[in-house]
Image (cartoon, rainbow, N blue to C red):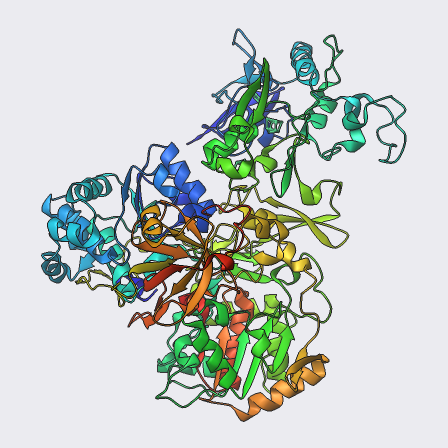
Amino acid sequence: MSNVNLTINGGKVSVSGNATVLEAAQAAGIYIPTLCHHQGLAPHGGCRLCLVEVEGMRRLTTACTTPVAEGMAVKTDTPQIQQLRRNILELVLSEHPHACFTCDRKERCGPLDICLRNVGVSERCVTCPKNRRCELQEVVNYIGMPEMTVPYTFRGLSVEKDGVFFDRDYNLCILCGRCVRVCQEVRGAGAVAFTYRGSQALIGTAFGQPLYDVGCQFCGACVDACPTGALVERSAKWMGTPDRQVTTTCPYCGVGCQLDVQVKHEHIINVIPNKDSPVNKGQACVKGKFGLDFVHDGDRLTSPLIKKNGSFVEASWDEALDLVVRSFSKYKGGQFAAIASAKCTNEDNYVLQKFVRAVMETNNIDHCARL
Amino acid sequence: MAGLATSFGSGAMTNSISEIGEASCILAIGTNTTIAHPVIGVEVKRALRGGGKLIVANPREISLCRMADIWLQHRPGSDVALLMGLMWIIVDEGLLDLAFVQERCENFEVFLDSLKDFHPKFVEQVTGVPAEQLAQAARMFATSKPATILYTMGITQHTHGTDNVLAIANLAMLTGNIGKPSTGVNPLRGQNNVQGACDMGSLPTVYSGYQSVADAKAQQKFQEAWGAKLSPTPGRTLTEIIEAPNLEPIKAIYLVGENPVLSDPDATHVRKALERLEFLVVQDIFLTETAQLADVVLPAASFAEKDGTFTNTERRVQRVRKVIDSPGESRPDWWITCQIARRMGAKGFDYQNPEEIMSEIARLTPSYGGISYQRIEQVGLQWPCPTAEHPGTIFLHKDTFSRGKGKFAPLQYRPSAEQPDADYPLILTTERSLYHYHTSTMTRKVKGLRKLRSQELLEINPSDAQKLGITDGQTVKVSSRRGQLTATARVTPVSPPGVVSMTFHFAETPTNVLTNPALDPVAKIPELKVAAVRVEPCRPEQNAPAPAMAGSR
Ligand code: SF4
Ligand code: SF4
Ligand code: FES
């Protein structure tokens, strides 16, 4: 598709003709608040926070569902738009704790401090696992806290602990439906859906059954999609912001998902499937998302071992390597073989076959890929 | 992947993962995609959302069947008959892409001749798939373009695995579904870097980039580059390394990161062979069942503790990056191997880092010629990528096949090596669990994954279970001509009558003592998918409590 030109808040933007207004704004670095929109999901137009004004259109329109057109003039932050957004937010916040938006002490408060605002323990900012990593906080920061005319009610639901690797705390849910859509549309599992308890809309499994019994694959896509603290990985729950994040390739199957691995205190605390990778496009499976802890296992080998009288004793690298070298030297040629690994890197494999061929003088090398 | 190399001249996945989502028709044969490759499952789902059709061919009612337009439930080991049957109908109804066949392929007449034996009536008899359903599938596949074929171990782990792959290649050529976007023949690799290990020459017959050791030019080139005299005699395959009665005995093995005592067919035998060695070095991150047998164990760094690259199933070379420090004295595999080489006085092993190794790979491997860490910093590149300017290759065989013309292969139906009989009346096929990986050296160290699936389950159809007096959760004895073990029965209609299945993820239930090591004559892949077994209930006092969470996953 050829590019089209439009203006956003007076600035010129040129994007592909099949982009949406939201995508055009993002490409131009202009923030439009969103809640129901999520990369990889079909545009939904449910939360209406992304309202923008398009010149010549009678009504405001949602940026996430509106395609760009040549010559379009878009405004994203007029006073009228901001006011409408505040009205929408007010409804969202009538069921979501808001100490984390309003309290002026929030920067200074630690988990063990006594709350000076008389907020119930389960609704405090410091007891939300997503505090400071939350999309809703980002949105409120941008739009400003609405004046609350409807009273806030705490849902008082118990936290669902059946996710094995993640918990579901629907007290923090804003009903954006991202988890439901990713589970159904993208993963094809359909494990969670909108449910009702009386007149109260909620997210949950059919008849409140455990996730395992409703076809959940524990892929964690819903957790990655959730903007709030409702769905959070257990491993990262109380860890706050990570020290660093490194993108690497998953060690499990041959798909080679790109994973953003988050580290705190030299421990892997969380894994976010990389959104820009053409291979996995923000998705992974249970093994890549939740299965990397094995590297921290206490049974890891940490020293070379030499077998003496039938049992292993720890040895230094010098000792072990000298023994290997002495023995290998006796078996050059057809008596020697190497078995390589499909789990090791290309570089590991290349060096190994070079060693077998150039030093051990044989082509006896194979790996277990036939299995 | 010998079959594909015969047909097209290259054994890799022909197309790319992200193309699957745009296909009009997907044939998934011998792949439990949503379990073994969930992220490919996401692509399949995307194709369906866009109106694409899905044909699943699998003896078991895997979860993919629920999404399928047509599910062909053929008997284990009857894949060649099924595929040839589809082609018989396509030819008979004139649905083939004759222009493509004539322009791009050869050996068509010979193939056509062999196709004569596969009348749908015969195919129905052999596969159990009704002729009418077969015809529906044939029409759907031949008329929805582009169409792509996905497969995995379900196809290759048979004594006739190469034939299966040749049949798939025939079908793709016959319908002109190759060398175009969202088409192709796509083997989904089970382990993260199988593709890379092959590309790098961890094979007895080739240097990196499939340059034959028997080829004088290649030998010359590597001799010059490495400064060493190289042997032109092909080496031994894994099975021949473990045992080859007629060859000089192997006395020393250097085994890196594998656990064949658990993964190999006929595991008892592997253990014995390794015990017989004079010297065994195992290099791994855990003290695996195999490492226990070693004379020296060398501690390796895990993937999270080193830099390097993996090549995925779509030929994409991607970066592996060091995330954390490796524990204790453990070191990256390349470092350890280099140390051994250097201490043996060899030249050419003093790399400072993996990036230097990659430049040597690029220099000596035409298909990796344009690959450098700098270029794959953001997004990996797909080989062939011969030069620094080349953008990489999204799909293969665009204008011509790697071998020139695509070669049709005449095929015959041959039953599996082992057929059920009075003593061993059931067919055992091996499976994978969503929650574990290979011999589960890694996954079993993850608490949550252990919780989701903690033990081996033998899946058996309710009708068979009833006949044998077996109830869900009961401990059963499984025996084959080679060995026996006990497992917990899971009674489920997912397994068709006459077929039982197990995974091979658990050390205490070494499924592979049961399986048949009979090899495919070409690819030398053992027949892990079909073995004849007998299942008996254990006495009640031997019953283990039923697992807390026992799904068919
Ligand atoms: S983990 Fe995956 S399958 Fe389970 S509810 Fe979340 S998205 Fe659905
Ligand atoms: S759980 Fe999270 S993703 Fe799901 S509807 Fe609630 S806020 Fe949205
Ligand atoms: S983000 Fe556009 S309507 Fe929710």
Observer-nearest of A306 and A6: A306
Residue found at x 63% / y 76%: B298
Q: Is any part of residue B9 visible from this angle?
A: no
Residue found at x 73% / y 45%: A242
Q: Position of residue B23 (x, y in %)?
A: 34, 41
Is the residue B335 above or below the residue B71 in the image? below
Quarter of the rendering containing residue B72: top left
Is the residue B66 above or below the residue B480 in the image? above
Specify the quarter for ligand 3.
top right
Q: Position of residue A250 (x, y in %)?
A: 56, 54
Q: Position of residue A100 (x, y in %)?
A: 78, 26
Q: In this view, does A32 lie to the left or right of B169?
A: right
Numbered disc total = 0
Q: In this view, does A20 lie to the left or right of B417?
A: right
Is the residue B526 above or below the residue A71 in the image? below
Q: Is residue A306 left or right of residue B155?
A: right
Q: Where is residue B60 in the image (x, y as percent from the top left)?
A: 34, 48
Is the residue B478 above or below the residue B148 in the image? below
Observer-nearest of A47 and B67: B67
Residue found at x 29% / y 44%: B147
Q: Residue furthest bottom?
A: A330
Q: Is any part of residue A337 visible from this angle?
A: yes
Observer-nearest of B39 and B349: B39
Quadrant of the image for the N terminus of chain B?
Answer: bottom left
